[in-house]
Image (tube, rainbow, N blue to C red):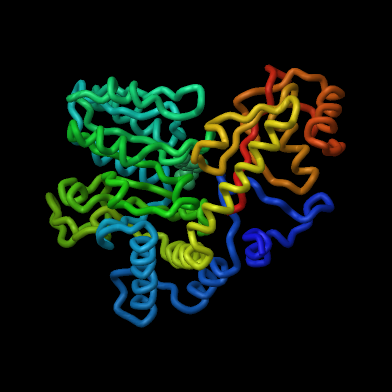
Amino acid sequence: MRLDEQTRPDFPILQRIVNGHPLVYLDSGASSQKPRSVIEAMNRYYERSHANVHRSIHTLGEEATELYELARDSVQRFIGAASREEVVFTRGTTDGLGLIAETIGRTLAKDDEIVVTELEHHSNLIPWQLVARDRGAHLKAVPVLADGTLDMAALDRLITRRTRVVAFAHVSNVLGTITPVAEIVRRARAVDAITVVDGAQAAPHLRLDMPSLGCDFYVFSAHKMLGPTGIGVMYGRRAVLDSLEPGRGGSEMIKEVWIDRAQWNDLPWRFEPGTPPIAEAVGLTAAIEYLEKVGMERVGEHERALTRQTLEGFARTPGVTAYGPPVSVDRGAVVAFAVEGLHPHDVAALLDAEGIAVRASLRDAADAPARRRRHLARDVLGVQLAGRGVAAPGGGRRAAFGAVGGPR
Ligand code: PLP
């Protein structure tokens, strides 16, 4: 049985009928849907065990703490981290990247250099812009080649003795490019730079093993990998975490406190101020267990087949251009595409009319009149335009642009 046939019944939301069609959800890159086991685990937690963690000496407090710490063990296993102390819970990828930038930012000096890439999600760009501005550091970006891969020759030129941080995505959320993490880490380490990997689009799809990637930090969000919103993971290599002062303060990250100073808590709690997302951690455990049961190798195989099918289908379709690495290159299951003459919102509206949820990007806007768009819709996409949601707001330039991700 195909993987999607086998797993579809596990996702209650996929029983919905949208515009008369059974829902097909292709927007998992933005946020994935949740299997019943995740929803039920969180409900059960709230119905039976909720209390605050690490501070309440009663049955519920102990149960909540145990469940929360169990999530850490699950993450450690899932990403192959050497120890549970290397797994820090955050509110998500953006939060984790912000925490790292703030923490490392304090150690940077004027004219230090931060290297990012042109592939970055804003969450892995803006925090470094802020740090560069505050510390008088310089921000440089590795260019992307025409085939969607990173210009590794340029990386060699951009990394210098002044480079303190190299921050980059494992899988691009736009082009689907998989970056050579271990190789970039090797080149960064040659100048003692800290490596920060944005794994938001990788953790849901690839089998991860932190020691073989070798990076200092690796961050991701639970909500893109079948888990709940509001929780993410910041993996930090033990030696690096040990060497850093906490970036943010508050309860949980201190052992003892006086008016003018405090003694920091042990790892990993030193980097987890405030009441953490406890029910969300329970949901994340259930999500990891679900993915492990399916098997990440199987997830990967299924996605590669879907990506090949999508890219080959687009290549045969007049008026459609796909971006990113070609089908022959190992790439993620995100496919960005343009439909000549169509606005991204039109593409999304068309697909929505078919019960297919995808995300439209606002990068480009169309100037094609509504009638032409309707014809293109029928001819290019083979779907009838619904009577609503058709007019492109504001008109604009030429291409439509969307992103389709495979089911996770
Ligand atoms: N980085 C990448 C590559 C992403 O795709 C996303 C979300 O789409 C983020 C970071 C931000 O993730 P979150 O919104 O969960 O913080």
Is 99 situated above or below 154? below
Name which residue lies at 70% across and 59% down. 14
Where residue 36 appears, as percent x and y from the top left, is 60, 68
Choose between 58 and 105: the one closer to the eye: 105
- Residue 337 image-quadrant placement: top right
- Residue 159 image-quadrant placement: top left
State the quadrant of the C terminus.
bottom right
Name which residue lies at 52% across and 76% down. 47
Where residue 63 appears, as percent x and y from the top left, is 38, 77
Is 227 situated above or below 401? below
State the quadrant of the N terminus.
bottom right
Task: Tell which residue pokes out farthest to the front in this image.
Answer: 328
Choose between 291 and 253: the one closer to the eye: 291
Where residue 404 appears, as percent x and y from the top left, is 63, 41
Is 406 situated above or below 323? below
Choose between 143 and 259: the one closer to the eye: 143
